[in-house]
Image (cartoon, rainbow, N blue to C red):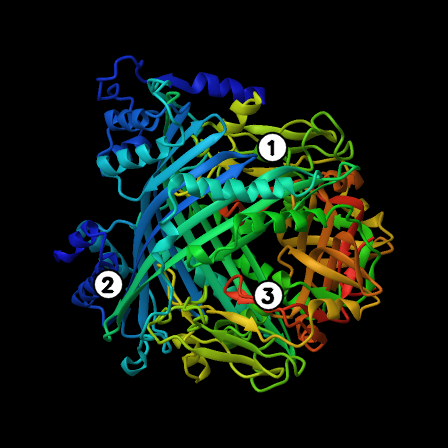
Amino acid sequence: MRWNQERNAAGRRKLKSRMNVKSASPVPGAISGHRRYFFDKFGITERLLERCLGEALSAGGDYADLYFESVTATSLGVDEQIVKSASQGTSAGCGIRVISGERTGYAYTDNLNPDRLLHAAKTAALIASGPAKQPVQGFTETRAADLYPVPLGGFDLDLAARLELLLRVDRTARAFDSRIVQVRAGYSEELRRILVVGSDGSFASDTQPLCRLNAFVIAKEGALTTKGSAGAGGRSGLAQFVGSKSPENLAREAARGAILQLGAIPAPAGEMEVVLGPGWPGILLHEAVGHGLEADFNRKGTSAFSGLIGRPVASSKVTVVDNGTMAGRRGSLNVDDEGSPTQETVLIENGVLKGYLTDKLSARLTGAANTGSGRRESYQSIPMPRMTNTYMLAGEDEPEDIIRSVKRGLYAPNFGGGQVDITNGKFVFSASEAYLIEDGKITAPVRDATLIGNGPEALKYVSMVGHDLKLDEGIGTCGKNGQSVPVGVGMPTIKLDKMTVGGTGR
Amino acid sequence: MPEVITQSEASASDANLDLESLAADVVVLAVKAGASDAEAVAREGDEFSVDVRMGQVETLTESGSRALGLRVLFGKKSASASTSDLTPDGIRQLVEGAVALARITEEDPFTGLPEAEEFGTIPGDLGLSFDDVYSLPGEERIEWARRAEAAALAADPRITNSNGASFNAATGRMALANSRGFAGGYRTSYAGISAAPLAKDGNGQMQRDYWSSSARRLRDLESPESVGAEAARRTLRRLGARRVPTQQVPIVFAPEVARSLIGSIADAASGDSIWRGASYLAGKLGSEIGVSGLTIIDDNAMVFPNGVGGFGTSPFDGEGLPSRRTVLVEGGVLRSYLLNTYAARKLGMKSTHNASRGLAGAPGIGVGNLYLEPGRQTPEEITAAIPKGLYVTSLMGFGVNLVTGDYSRGATGLWIENGELTHAVEEVTIAGNLAEMFRSVTAIGNDLVFRSSVAAPTLRIDGMTIAGA
């Protein structure tokens, strides 16, 4: 934590001191490449940014910011051994926000001409009423980390290299087993450029690459049909698709999952001991505690975790962090969508609730520090506190010992999606690969089942934590109030002494 | 670049026509660039929304955006592109991008536009767009949201907090054109109001729920007061919720959750899943897939007696084929899949005019107004016949596997004891298999109401497993 704060403090660099409103050109040599993009491509000037912020605050708002976004995206698909689809998209726009007390005015435009921007600023300004009271501060560029190289994106891609990844998925999955009857592979990537400037003088820009590779298969045996899927990705280039993220491994994982399901028995129903495998099962943390700790819910007193800071919410073996500073990871960001540097935030330490995830608004209203968690789906959306990469720190138990300790229970190493009701704390997450544990041994695979629990209680039943912390492969997307953002999760192998498994069997 | 593109920027009064010209022009450019066929979609939308919380405005959003999508075909090869940059430069890049991508795709014998004689659009006014959605003055819009929240907060002293209430309005325009002669466009409008109160009981347990009303026409919206009151009623009845033991009992799905089951049948009957074999309904055409009382219709041409079109109504589908009514399931027998042109060709069938269209990518498959035909029993009669069971009012999670039909979701609701709704239930799952569930429907209510494009009456299903304490 402290390291991050120091880095942030040292990383802020004065570009020019305000007061001198007329100075239109920035300090020579100080313009970063990210920022240059909007200046060059859309004719944005520092003077225009100031005018828009001034207009946004003209009716008496406390704070205003402009969020410029330009996204280019490409996707490719191989289906039935044919390169069937190729698609690209580009969009650009600006969202203008004005905050007045707890009120937010928002307007956006996909036309970056000065008069359209000023019009949007005027519209957002109307959330306040009165004379202007806040001056626009001189810009200070946020110098953030460099968590991802930026080789991806644009439309000048080496498409052949990307197609080769898909064809490797296709070949490997088909060769895996004669019962694999359908294979589909998809690759998508985007390059998102942002420029965020605030009336508080904040000025940040970033270029964020993101890509993913997916395998999807259908297996058939007699009258039985099953599916399997796997994927990997992150904020780095094609070189990441090696080892566990290689096309071959993803194809095998998808195929293995589908074949396994052909022999699966009904999942059990009821409360039992549950062992979650390392990696993607960390979605448990995302649903059980993560959302409940987002500061907007807590500020309003609508979360089951409201007012629980300093109280035990998990067993003492549990420490959970949200960390947006991990190089190349899907959930990572150099700066959040309000231009604040991301950081590592301890949510739960040795079982005790430590803190919430905040953005500028919730930090200001609650007096808490800004954790750099303000995120949004696009320029059309208002930012709110969100997770980045959320994971549980490793413990000391041997994964084998954890399995061995279970008399009768469920071992779930892979999951699909999850959901939470943050007010009553109830959450679900759906196992896509799971097995019975009988007398300390993993036995029969079971069919898909949803697990359900209560957020503030569930982690109190964590009795063993493995030393095998693993992060997911980089394909998670989180939805909140209709906005989707990429996230990561992670976890070591853990044992919950009780959790409800929603199957149909005994 | 043709003049018309700059015109579309200028004229607000006849924006629809301009979008159609824009789409048509892009098709011409693509063909000039060598495409053997092309299809363009242009969209434009405006939105207004206000969220009020604890009587104060929380957020106010007002904006609009436009975008253009293009699909090009070079024989049996296809690719697509989209952009929000509608300047001549942006459009040139759109066309060049799509054409360049088409070079790397491979021939797919089933790809391509529909045949020219298939195109069409339903004539007449389908009641999709009403100017009154923006007729409320700004202050009045805020007031409507305030009134909805106030009604919820005033309903009971146990309603102590709120996730807010909102009013929103939106209008949209879309145009579709292709190189085989189709050109069409239409406008839509929407208004909505919602409230989401929180309740707290003596033990400190908190619950939330919400209610909303949506309409294409402002004057068809339910009153803010009734939305707030219903939101409060739904929230209050969740208080005192507890778990129930693991067991098999009849499950009654309230209309607002029964609709998701009907949605699952439509997803499983979607041609794209069918040709892949990735659906438990693959190969089941003409077979009995449910009880004899089960009739499911998808009608994307539906207009209500008051002249207002359904939420899923449009004059033509995403490929320019005229909208129409499709009987999906009749008396428990699967009568049709849901097909676009591609899936139809894969299966050797005809499109059911269910193509959906995003901006980029090939057309998908979507439903219009999808519904389960009502039965005769009132919801009260259905519940009254059950000695012990669960009345489900909301579902959580994504535990529906359309390939195997396996179904397992988190549920909340009310416990049924001797035919009466008693205490609230939470933190349980309900599980079964779709194939068996629709053969185990033992009652269908008479309470079909179209609150959205997918609707179902109350539904009772036997034989499912509750997992709980």
In which quadrant is the N terminus of chain B drawn? bottom left
Q: Nearer the viewer, residue B358 or B375?
A: B375
Q: Is residue A185 above or below residue A116?
A: below
Are the residues flagged by discs 1 and 2 in contact, CB closer than 8 Å?
no
Q: Secondary structure at mark 1?
A: loop
Coordinates of residue A228 in the picture (x, y in percent): 59, 63
Are the residues flagged by discs 1 and 3 in contact, CB closer than 8 Å?
no
Q: Quadrant of residue B162?
A: top right
Q: Badge 2 local density, few (<14 within 10 Å), some, or many (20+)?
A: many
Q: Secondary structure at mark 2?
A: helix
Whole-number angstrom distance, CA of label 1 to CA of label 3: 32 Å
Q: Nearer the viewer, residue B148 or B435?
A: B148
**Disc on res. A300:** 1
Q: Quadrant of residue B54?
A: top right
The three-letter amino acid code for the residue at tag 1 is Lys
Q: Secondary structure at mark 3?
A: helix
Coordinates of residue A65 in the picture (x, y in percent): 38, 29
Coordinates of residue A427 in the picture (x, y in percent): 68, 48
